[in-house]
Amino acid sequence: MDDLLFQIEPIIPALRRYARGLMRDASAADDLVQDCLERVISHWHRRRNSDARTWAFAILHNLAINRMRQTARRGQHVTFDEVEERLMSHAPTQEDGLTRADIASAIEQLPEEQRSVLLLVSVEDFSYSEVADILTIPVGTVMSRLSRARERLKQILENPSRGARPVSHLRRVK
């Protein structure tokens, strides 16, 4: 353990400088150095070469590359308070209201057994087996009703005139 402290302690400032240069953020660099030192300590017995400085810098570099790749994949972390309110939501448009009304109307046109399965699975987020227990029907029936409900809903929304219930027409009496 004394050997570890003797070799690693003097290079910590250099590790911090290198980490700050790579990360361009002091707190991220300090986190990176801490993770590096944890790895150095936990894997000290595995080092192959006698130069601890080179080995520690290689660990730091690899950790930094992994973090940068992870940040590129996930995007930069932004706290909730830093985001502008206008970017988090937008006011609904008239079209959104009409779309919701069309969907609600289309769902109302479905037969009750299809509508109940569709609502339980899609809106209430129940699993097929939970819906089968709720409605006391087999799971296969849940799946077939859901499939038919989705297909029917698609037909109604794509062609409202074909999917709509027949409208009773007034007869003309002379």
Image (cartoon, grey):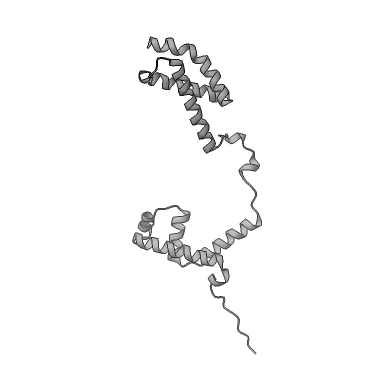
- Whether residue 136 is visible: no
Question: Percent x, y for residue 126?
Answer: 42, 53
Compared to residue 85, the image places residue 126 above or below, namely: below
- Say which quadrant the N terminus sits in: top left
Which residue is pictured at 39% across the width and 53% down the height?
127
Compared to residue 123, the image places residue 158 above or below, namely: below
Compared to residue 32, the image places residue 50 above or below, namely: above
- The reply, left or right, for residue 101 in relation to residue 5 is right
In depth, the one of 141 and 10 nearer the eye is 10
Question: Percent x, y for residue 119?
Answer: 46, 58
Compared to residue 22, the image places residue 165 above or below, namely: below
In depth, the one of 23 and 122 nearer the eye is 23
Which image quadrant for residue 134? bottom left
- Whether residue 170 is visible: yes
Which image quadrant for residue 27? top right
- The reply, left or right, for residue 119 in relation to residue 135 is right
Question: Percent x, y for residue 144?
Answer: 39, 63
Residue lying farthest bottom? 174
- Say which quadrant the C terminus sits in: bottom right
Which residue is pictured at 56% across the width and 22% down the height?
20
In depth, the one of 18 and 135 nearer the eye is 18
Which residue is pictured at 64% across the width and 38% down the height?
84
Which residue is pictured at 53% across the width and 72% down the height?
165
In depth, the one of 162 and 14 nearer the eye is 14
